[in-house]
Image: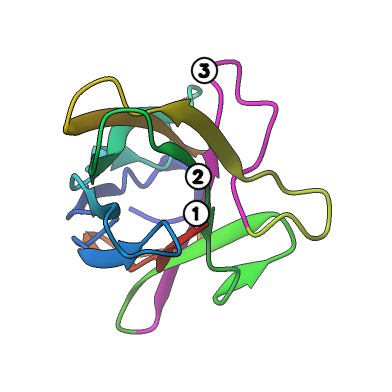
Amino acid sequence: MQGDKMKIALKLMPLLCCLVATVPISAGGATYCEIASANVSFGTYDALAPARRDTIGSITVTCTGSVGDKVSYSISLDTLGQNGGYRVMTNGEGKLYYVVYTDSWHTQVWGDGGGGSSVVSDSFMMTTSRITHTYPIFGRIPAGQKGGSSGTYSANLAVTLAY
């Protein structure tokens, strides 16, 4: 079959690969944070389906320090590989566009704070010696992308923790 009648099913592998970093938070070096991301997988995508494909992943920040220490940071995503507001997954020569958001309403594009994108910021006081905060990643593949071929698509994002 050819044209609009051809059904393309795409199996997508994890969108985000794990990034773990140890970042000092306080001037004395007593408090530090580790950041990790859970893989995000869109599953099977049908280019002829009328609906978009959404998924949720997460980024986790675990801070270790002394009770009473103040911790402030922001989490940004790289903008490399972007095409406007869209990011690109590849499969050899095929491309599949997607967007990563900070909110479940899919209104705030997660990026580095430039070009209208948002970063996720948090600030808190250490109430125990170890605190973990989890931030959801909302991914979306717009419907009707017919440029890609069937197969496995993947992309990597660099996650940055700034304090």
| Residue type, label 3 | Ser
Tell me if residue 154 can be seen. no
Q: Residue furthest right?
A: 115
Label 3 – label 1 distance at C-alpha? 26 Å
| Residue type, label 2 | Asp
Q: What residue sits right under mark 2 in the picture?
A: 4
Q: Is mark 3 on a helix, strand or loop?
A: loop
> CB of mark 1 within 8 Å of CB of mark 2?
yes
Q: Please identify the quarter of the rendering in which residue 108 is found.
A: top right
Q: What residue sits right under mark 3 in the picture?
A: 104
How many other residues sit within 10 Å of disc 1, few (<14), some (14-19) or many (≥20)?
some
Label 3 – label 2 distance at C-alpha? 31 Å
Along the line of sight, the residue nearer the viewer: 90 or 4: 90
Q: Does the magenta stretch include residue 98?
A: yes
Q: Is residue 61 above or below residue 155?
A: above
| Residue type, label 1 | Lys
Sequence-wise first label, 1 or 2 = 2
Q: How many labels does the image show?
A: 3
Q: Is residue 11 above or below residue 153?
A: above
Q: Is mark 1 on a helix, strand or loop?
A: loop
Q: What residue sits right under mark 1 in the picture?
A: 146
Q: Is residue 70 above or below residue 159?
A: above
Give the residues in magenta. 93-111
